[in-house]
Image (cartoon, grey):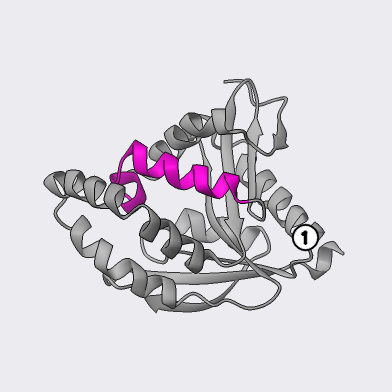
Amino acid sequence: MNTNETHICRPSVDDLATIYEIHKRAFPGFFLTALGPVFLKGYYRAMLLKKDTIFLVERADEIIGFACGLEDAASFNFKYMKKNIKQLAFSVCLAVTQRPSILFRVFTRPQDARKQPHRLGMIHLLSIAVDPKASGHGTGSRLLEAFKTEALKRSFSEVYLTTDANGNEKANAFYLKNGFRKINSHSSGNGRLMNEYICSLNHLK
């Protein structure tokens, strides 16, 4: 995979299959991954088609990473789950046969969403992932910087995200290295300790 010449742009609907594959490889065992390709590609499709979403990919000879987020992530997630409740139920049933703990995550996820702050000028970075085959070449940092630049163009003043606190040292170090500061930690509905980070965009003005 050639990562020497890349560019960052908004993806098209035709890219959703590749975005799903990168998500699956980057986040094995995670809740959304366990729900399978139909549900997850539908989730990213809904985000992509929402005009106020920031959705970026880095391309080399193919897509090697992506980042996406929006202002009111909790509301978006709730509305998407509600609108696609039948597909969610079907995906959960399939996932539970392999991982029974998934059922607990379904009921605790709304509690996690309520713990996320929402205020004027803040955009939530919901997902950033790099194909493991292309890691180590700065793709994540470039995507994060492009995301912040686009957020500033849209008059946002800060970027917010959450990530696992334990067993996730590489990701936590990555955010600190890229201008984020930890503002809080909280226990999610299923007992996972989550770190909350924020990055001010004032330095980009």
Q: Residue at x 57, y 55 (%)?
A: 174
Boundaries of the magenta span = 30-50
Point 31% across, 55% down: residue: 85
Q: Is residue 143 above or below residue 176?
A: above
On the image, numbered disc 1 is attached to which residue?
154
Residue 100 at x, y = what percent? 14, 54
Q: Amino acid at mark 1?
A: Arg
Magenta span contains residue 47: yes
How many residues crowd mark 1 within 10 Å: few (<14), some (14–19), many (20+)? few
Residue 91 pos. (x, y %): 25, 46
Task: Give the residue displayed 75% in from the left and 53% down from the top.
Answer: 150
Residue 157 falls left or right of residue 69: right
Depth check: give the residue in front, 143 or 72: 72
Which quarter of the image is occupied by the C terminus?
bottom right
Can residue 129 be seen at all in this image of the molecule?
Answer: yes
Up-down relation of residue 173 to residue 45 (above or below): below
Magenta span main SS: helix
Q: Residue at x 35, y 70 (%)?
A: 110
Residue 144 in percent (x, y) is at: 66, 51
Magenta segment: does it hold 177?
Answer: no
